[in-house]
Amino acid sequence: MEVSVRDNDVDQALRALKKKMQREGIFREMKMRRSYEKPSERRAREKAEAIRRARKLERKRLEREGF
């Protein structure tokens, strides 16, 4: 990942880097890797994420259809 600094504006480059990292999911992954996650907890988390994604897609589909 690369961010260029323009006109010695480090703050703007830092904001751009943080935004890129947020989009890539790096912060979330770092948070998850701080401590060990048991395989059963991982399965439960992944299942909950899948359910959340499915519900969100269903909501969007219904919204597009006008319900």
Image (cartoon, grey):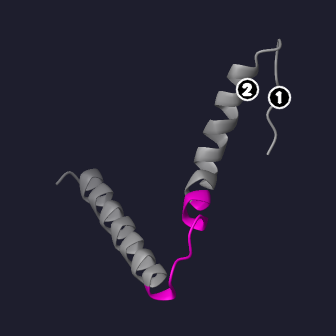
Tags 2 and 1 touching, CB below 8 Å: yes
The residue located at (82%, 40%) in the rendering is 2
Q: Secondary structure at mark 2?
A: helix
In the rendered view, would you say 38 is above or below 19?
Answer: below
The residue located at (55%, 65%) in the rendering is 32
What span is colored magenta in the figure? Answer: 29-40
Q: Secondary structure at mark 1?
A: loop
The residue located at (55%, 56%) in the rendering is 28
Taking depth in this image into account, of 51 and 16 the one nearest to the observer is 16
Mark before the other along the chain sequence, 2 or 1: 1
Q: Which residue is mark 2?
A: 13
In the rendered view, would you say 17 is above or below 13?
Answer: below
Q: Residue 7 falls in which quadrant of the image?
A: top right
For residue 4, the mark is: 1
User: Marks 2 and 1, how far apart in space?
Assistant: 7 Å
Per the image, is 37 magenta? Answer: yes
Q: Amino acid at mark 2?
A: Ala
Q: Amino acid at mark 1?
A: Ser
Per the image, is 54 magenta? Answer: no
